[in-house]
Image (spheres, rainbow, N blue to C red):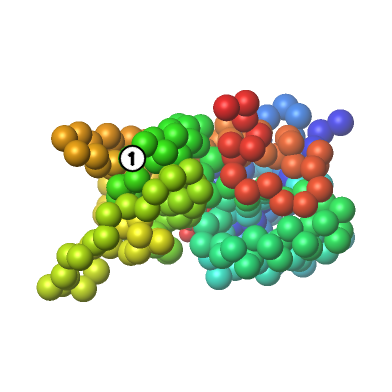
Amino acid sequence: MSLTVAVCGALGRMGREVVKTIAAAPDLELTGAVDRGVDQPVDAGVAAGVGELGITVVSTLESLAANPPEILVDFTQPDSVMANAIRGLDMGSHLVIGTTGLSQGDLKQLDEAARATGRGVIVAPNFALGAVLMMNFAALAAKYFPDVEIIELHHEQKKDAPSGTAIKTAEMIRAAREANGFIDACWESLPGARGGDFDGIRIHSVRLPGFVAHQEVIFGLTGQTLTIRHDSTSRESFMPGVLLAIREVSKIEGLIYGLEHLLQL
Ligand code: NAD
Protein backbone atom coordinates (compact mmCIF):
# COMPACT_ATOMS: atom_id res chain seq x y z
CA MET A 1 0.00 0.00 0.00
CA SER A 2 1.41 3.36 -1.05
CA LEU A 3 1.23 6.44 1.14
CA THR A 4 -0.85 9.10 -0.60
CA VAL A 5 0.79 12.53 -0.77
CA ALA A 6 -0.26 15.94 -2.07
CA VAL A 7 2.05 18.89 -2.62
CA CYS A 8 1.04 22.47 -1.86
CA GLY A 9 3.16 24.95 -3.80
CA ALA A 10 3.58 22.34 -6.57
CA LEU A 11 4.65 24.88 -9.21
CA GLY A 12 7.35 26.50 -7.07
CA ARG A 13 11.05 25.69 -7.15
CA MET A 14 10.85 23.31 -4.16
CA GLY A 15 7.36 22.01 -5.00
CA ARG A 16 8.44 20.82 -8.45
CA GLU A 17 11.45 19.05 -6.95
CA VAL A 18 9.17 17.36 -4.39
CA VAL A 19 6.74 16.24 -7.13
CA LYS A 20 9.68 14.74 -9.05
CA THR A 21 10.90 12.96 -5.92
CA ILE A 22 7.49 11.53 -5.02
CA ALA A 23 7.00 10.32 -8.61
CA ALA A 24 10.25 8.35 -8.32
CA ALA A 25 9.46 6.81 -4.89
CA PRO A 26 7.88 3.34 -5.20
CA ASP A 27 6.13 3.56 -1.82
CA LEU A 28 4.52 6.98 -2.41
CA GLU A 29 1.60 8.00 -4.61
CA LEU A 30 1.02 11.61 -5.65
CA THR A 31 -2.73 12.18 -5.37
CA GLY A 32 -2.90 15.97 -5.41
CA ALA A 33 -1.03 19.12 -6.36
CA VAL A 34 -2.01 22.65 -5.39
CA ASP A 35 -0.57 25.99 -6.40
CA ARG A 36 -2.38 29.30 -6.14
CA GLY A 37 -0.31 30.59 -9.04
CA VAL A 38 -1.79 28.12 -11.58
CA ASP A 39 -3.39 30.05 -14.46
CA GLN A 40 -4.16 27.23 -16.91
CA PRO A 41 -4.63 23.45 -16.47
CA VAL A 42 -1.25 21.79 -16.10
CA ASP A 43 -0.20 18.31 -15.07
CA ALA A 44 2.03 18.33 -11.96
CA GLY A 45 4.49 15.90 -13.56
CA VAL A 46 4.75 17.95 -16.74
CA ALA A 47 5.42 21.09 -14.66
CA ALA A 48 8.11 19.19 -12.73
CA GLY A 49 9.71 17.92 -15.93
CA VAL A 50 9.01 14.21 -15.38
CA GLY A 51 6.13 13.72 -17.83
CA GLU A 52 2.40 13.23 -17.23
CA LEU A 53 1.41 11.87 -13.82
CA GLY A 54 -2.34 12.32 -14.31
CA ILE A 55 -2.55 14.91 -11.52
CA THR A 56 -3.77 18.35 -12.56
CA VAL A 57 -2.55 21.22 -10.41
CA VAL A 58 -5.50 22.91 -8.68
CA SER A 59 -5.52 26.42 -7.26
CA THR A 60 -6.98 25.78 -3.79
CA LEU A 61 -6.55 23.16 -1.10
CA GLU A 62 -10.34 22.89 -0.78
CA SER A 63 -10.35 21.04 -4.13
CA LEU A 64 -8.58 18.12 -2.39
CA ALA A 65 -11.16 17.81 0.40
CA ALA A 66 -13.13 15.07 -1.40
CA ASN A 67 -10.01 12.90 -1.63
CA PRO A 68 -7.63 14.13 1.08
CA PRO A 69 -4.06 12.84 1.00
CA GLU A 70 -2.61 11.00 3.99
CA ILE A 71 0.25 13.47 3.89
CA LEU A 72 0.26 17.07 2.74
CA VAL A 73 3.66 18.61 1.94
CA ASP A 74 3.84 22.42 2.02
CA PHE A 75 6.51 24.48 0.29
CA THR A 76 4.64 27.75 -0.27
CA GLN A 77 5.18 31.16 1.30
CA PRO A 78 5.37 32.51 4.84
CA ASP A 79 2.00 34.28 4.47
CA SER A 80 0.25 31.11 3.19
CA VAL A 81 1.59 28.26 5.24
CA MET A 82 -0.46 28.56 8.45
CA ALA A 83 -3.82 28.69 6.65
CA ASN A 84 -2.78 25.72 4.48
CA ALA A 85 -1.64 23.78 7.53
CA ILE A 86 -4.88 24.28 9.45
CA ARG A 87 -6.91 23.30 6.34
CA GLY A 88 -4.72 20.25 5.88
CA LEU A 89 -5.26 19.10 9.47
CA ASP A 90 -9.01 19.74 9.14
CA MET A 91 -8.99 17.46 6.05
CA GLY A 92 -7.36 14.75 8.18
CA SER A 93 -3.89 14.89 6.61
CA HIS A 94 -0.54 14.69 8.37
CA LEU A 95 1.75 17.60 7.45
CA VAL A 96 5.33 17.96 6.28
CA ILE A 97 6.21 21.65 6.18
CA GLY A 98 9.33 23.10 4.60
CA THR A 99 8.03 26.66 4.24
CA THR A 100 10.03 29.02 6.42
CA GLY A 101 9.00 32.14 8.32
CA LEU A 102 6.91 30.40 11.02
CA SER A 103 6.98 32.13 14.43
CA GLN A 104 7.17 30.42 17.83
CA GLY A 105 3.46 31.21 18.21
CA ASP A 106 2.71 29.53 14.86
CA LEU A 107 4.62 26.41 15.94
CA LYS A 108 2.69 26.27 19.22
CA GLN A 109 -0.61 26.64 17.36
CA LEU A 110 0.39 23.87 14.94
CA ASP A 111 1.31 21.54 17.80
CA GLU A 112 -2.04 22.15 19.51
CA ALA A 113 -4.03 21.74 16.28
CA ALA A 114 -2.16 18.54 15.41
CA ARG A 115 -2.78 17.04 18.86
CA ALA A 116 -6.45 18.03 18.72
CA THR A 117 -6.85 16.14 15.44
CA GLY A 118 -4.53 13.25 16.36
CA ARG A 119 -2.22 14.05 13.45
CA GLY A 120 1.53 14.50 13.02
CA VAL A 121 3.30 17.63 11.80
CA ILE A 122 6.99 17.82 10.88
CA VAL A 123 8.37 21.31 10.32
CA ALA A 124 11.99 21.57 9.22
CA PRO A 125 13.55 24.90 8.30
CA ASN A 126 16.18 22.90 6.43
CA PHE A 127 15.79 19.35 5.09
CA ALA A 128 19.42 18.99 3.97
CA LEU A 129 21.40 16.53 6.08
CA GLY A 130 24.54 18.70 5.88
CA ALA A 131 22.64 21.72 7.18
CA VAL A 132 21.30 19.73 10.13
CA LEU A 133 24.85 18.61 10.94
CA MET A 134 26.10 22.21 10.56
CA MET A 135 23.51 23.35 13.13
CA ASN A 136 24.49 20.58 15.53
CA PHE A 137 28.22 21.27 15.13
CA ALA A 138 27.47 24.95 15.81
CA ALA A 139 25.61 24.06 19.01
CA LEU A 140 28.58 21.92 20.08
CA ALA A 141 31.06 24.74 19.39
CA ALA A 142 28.88 27.32 21.17
CA LYS A 143 29.65 25.72 24.50
CA TYR A 144 33.30 26.76 24.12
CA PHE A 145 32.94 29.81 21.81
CA PRO A 146 30.23 32.19 23.10
CA ASP A 147 31.03 34.87 20.51
CA VAL A 148 29.41 34.03 17.20
CA GLU A 149 27.87 35.56 14.10
CA ILE A 150 25.83 33.90 11.35
CA ILE A 151 25.95 34.74 7.66
CA GLU A 152 23.26 33.12 5.51
CA LEU A 153 23.24 33.43 1.72
CA HIS A 154 20.25 32.67 -0.52
CA HIS A 155 18.94 33.29 -4.03
CA GLU A 156 17.42 36.67 -4.77
CA GLN A 157 13.81 35.43 -4.85
CA LYS A 158 13.69 34.20 -1.26
CA LYS A 159 10.81 36.02 0.42
CA ASP A 160 11.89 36.00 4.10
CA ALA A 161 14.98 37.14 5.97
CA PRO A 162 16.71 35.91 7.97
CA SER A 163 16.35 32.30 6.81
CA GLY A 164 14.58 29.74 8.98
CA THR A 165 17.88 27.87 9.19
CA ALA A 166 19.67 30.93 10.60
CA ILE A 167 16.99 31.41 13.24
CA LYS A 168 17.03 27.74 14.18
CA THR A 169 20.85 27.83 14.39
CA ALA A 170 20.69 30.89 16.64
CA GLU A 171 18.10 29.17 18.85
CA MET A 172 20.33 26.09 19.17
CA ILE A 173 23.40 28.23 19.95
CA ARG A 174 21.46 30.22 22.56
CA ALA A 175 20.36 26.99 24.24
CA ALA A 176 23.85 25.45 24.16
CA ARG A 177 26.16 28.29 25.14
CA GLU A 178 27.05 28.72 28.77
CA ALA A 179 28.02 32.41 28.61
CA ASN A 180 26.74 35.35 26.60
CA GLY A 181 28.84 36.86 23.81
CA PHE A 182 30.74 40.15 24.18
CA ILE A 183 28.83 43.42 24.60
CA ASP A 184 28.67 44.91 21.11
CA ALA A 185 29.39 48.64 21.49
CA CYS A 186 29.79 49.17 17.76
CA TRP A 187 28.04 52.28 16.36
CA GLU A 188 26.40 51.79 12.96
CA SER A 189 26.93 54.73 10.59
CA LEU A 190 24.83 52.69 8.11
CA PRO A 191 21.76 51.18 9.85
CA GLY A 192 21.74 47.40 9.54
CA ALA A 193 25.48 47.15 8.99
CA ARG A 194 25.81 44.81 11.99
CA GLY A 195 22.93 42.61 10.81
CA GLY A 196 19.90 41.49 12.82
CA ASP A 197 20.23 40.96 16.56
CA PHE A 198 18.89 37.60 17.79
CA ASP A 199 19.55 37.71 21.54
CA GLY A 200 23.06 39.06 20.93
CA ILE A 201 23.76 36.73 17.99
CA ARG A 202 24.19 38.81 14.82
CA ILE A 203 22.57 37.37 11.68
CA HIS A 204 23.51 38.73 8.25
CA SER A 205 21.35 37.86 5.21
CA VAL A 206 22.82 37.96 1.72
CA ARG A 207 20.43 37.76 -1.28
CA LEU A 208 22.00 37.34 -4.71
CA PRO A 209 21.32 35.46 -7.96
CA GLY A 210 23.51 32.37 -8.20
CA PHE A 211 23.02 31.18 -4.63
CA VAL A 212 20.70 28.31 -3.57
CA ALA A 213 20.99 28.01 0.25
CA HIS A 214 24.22 28.52 2.18
CA GLN A 215 25.26 29.38 5.72
CA GLU A 216 28.42 30.18 7.63
CA VAL A 217 28.60 30.20 11.40
CA ILE A 218 31.72 32.05 12.54
CA PHE A 219 32.95 31.66 16.11
CA GLY A 220 35.65 33.89 17.54
CA LEU A 221 37.90 33.33 20.55
CA THR A 222 41.16 35.05 21.46
CA GLY A 223 43.73 34.14 18.83
CA GLN A 224 41.45 31.86 16.79
CA THR A 225 38.26 31.65 14.77
CA LEU A 226 36.23 28.61 13.83
CA THR A 227 34.01 28.66 10.73
CA ILE A 228 31.36 26.03 10.03
CA ARG A 229 29.89 26.27 6.54
CA HIS A 230 27.22 24.38 4.63
CA ASP A 231 26.25 24.81 0.97
CA SER A 232 23.19 23.44 -0.77
CA THR A 233 24.21 23.74 -4.40
CA SER A 234 20.97 22.19 -5.72
CA ARG A 235 17.46 21.62 -4.38
CA GLU A 236 18.04 17.87 -4.64
CA SER A 237 19.97 18.26 -1.36
CA PHE A 238 16.66 18.67 0.50
CA MET A 239 14.90 15.60 -0.94
CA PRO A 240 16.24 12.74 1.24
CA GLY A 241 15.12 14.74 4.30
CA VAL A 242 11.70 15.45 2.78
CA LEU A 243 11.24 11.75 1.98
CA LEU A 244 12.25 10.76 5.51
CA ALA A 245 9.71 13.21 6.97
CA ILE A 246 6.94 11.96 4.64
CA ARG A 247 7.61 8.37 5.71
CA GLU A 248 7.76 9.19 9.44
CA VAL A 249 5.07 11.82 9.96
CA SER A 250 2.08 9.47 10.18
CA LYS A 251 3.81 7.68 13.11
CA ILE A 252 3.75 10.77 15.35
CA GLU A 253 1.13 12.94 17.02
CA GLY A 254 1.76 16.67 17.47
CA LEU A 255 4.69 18.72 16.19
CA ILE A 256 8.31 17.81 15.52
CA TYR A 257 10.42 20.89 14.73
CA GLY A 258 13.69 20.08 13.01
CA LEU A 259 14.94 17.13 10.99
CA GLU A 260 17.56 16.35 13.64
CA HIS A 261 14.81 14.72 15.74
CA LEU A 262 14.39 12.05 13.03
CA LEU A 263 18.10 11.28 12.75
CA GLN A 264 20.41 9.27 15.01
CA LEU A 265 22.91 12.08 15.69
P1 NAD B 1 8.67 29.57 -4.78
O1 NAD B 1 8.25 30.99 -4.69
O2 NAD B 1 9.46 29.10 -5.96
O3 NAD B 1 7.39 28.62 -4.67
C1 NAD B 1 6.30 28.82 -3.81
C2 NAD B 1 5.06 28.36 -4.54
O4 NAD B 1 3.97 28.34 -3.61
C3 NAD B 1 4.64 29.31 -5.68
O5 NAD B 1 4.47 28.56 -6.88
C4 NAD B 1 3.32 29.92 -5.19
O6 NAD B 1 2.41 30.19 -6.25
C5 NAD B 1 2.82 28.81 -4.27
N1 NAD B 1 1.87 29.28 -3.23
C6 NAD B 1 1.97 30.36 -2.44
N2 NAD B 1 0.92 30.43 -1.61
C7 NAD B 1 0.14 29.37 -1.88
C8 NAD B 1 -1.08 28.88 -1.34
N3 NAD B 1 -1.73 29.52 -0.36
N4 NAD B 1 -1.60 27.74 -1.88
C9 NAD B 1 -0.98 27.10 -2.89
N5 NAD B 1 0.19 27.51 -3.43
C10 NAD B 1 0.75 28.63 -2.92
O7 NAD B 1 9.48 29.27 -3.43
P2 NAD B 1 10.50 28.07 -3.14
O8 NAD B 1 11.87 28.50 -3.45
O9 NAD B 1 9.96 26.81 -3.71
O10 NAD B 1 10.41 28.01 -1.54
C11 NAD B 1 9.19 27.71 -0.90
C12 NAD B 1 9.38 27.78 0.61
O11 NAD B 1 10.27 26.74 1.00
C13 NAD B 1 10.02 29.08 1.12
O12 NAD B 1 9.45 29.43 2.35
C14 NAD B 1 11.48 28.69 1.29
O13 NAD B 1 12.13 29.50 2.26
C15 NAD B 1 11.34 27.28 1.78
N6 NAD B 1 12.48 26.40 1.62
C16 NAD B 1 12.65 25.49 2.60
C17 NAD B 1 13.65 24.55 2.50
C18 NAD B 1 13.78 23.51 3.58
O14 NAD B 1 14.68 22.66 3.52
N7 NAD B 1 12.89 23.53 4.58
C19 NAD B 1 14.51 24.55 1.40
C20 NAD B 1 14.32 25.51 0.41
C21 NAD B 1 13.28 26.42 0.52
- For label 1, the crowd category at 10 Å Cα-Cα, with few meaning under 14, some 14 to 19 and many 20 or more, is many
> Is residue 28 shown left or right of residue 17?
right
Residue at x 17% of width, y 65% of height: 186
Quick check: 217 above or below 67? Answer: above
Q: Position of residue 142 (x, y in %)?
A: 39, 40
Quick check: 246 above or below 6? Answer: above
Q: Can residue 42 be seen here?
A: no
Viewer-side residue, 51 vs 150: 150
Q: Which residue, given by chain and number where applicable, does mark 1 sit on? A: 145
Q: Position of residue 156 (x, y in %)?
A: 32, 58
Viewer-side residue, 115 vs 35: 115
User: Could you say which quadrant of the image residue 50 lies in?
Assistant: top right
Q: Can residue 139 be seen here?
A: yes
Farthest residue, direction left:
189
Label 1 CB, ligand 1: below 8 Å?
A: no
Residue at x 39% of width, y 48% of height: 179
Q: Position of residue 178 (x, y in %)?
A: 44, 45
> Is residue 196 shown left or right of residue 131?
left
Farthest residue, direction front:
179
Count how many numbered circles sit on residues in the image: 1
The C terminus, quarter of image:
top right
Viewer-side residue, 140 vs 66: 140
Residue at x 64% of width, y 37% of height: 261
Element type where label 1 sits in the image? loop
Under mark 1, the amino acid is Phe
Q: Position of residue 255 (x, y in %)?
A: 72, 51
The N terminus, quarter of image:
top right
User: Could you say which quadrant of the image residue 86 lies in?
Assistant: bottom right
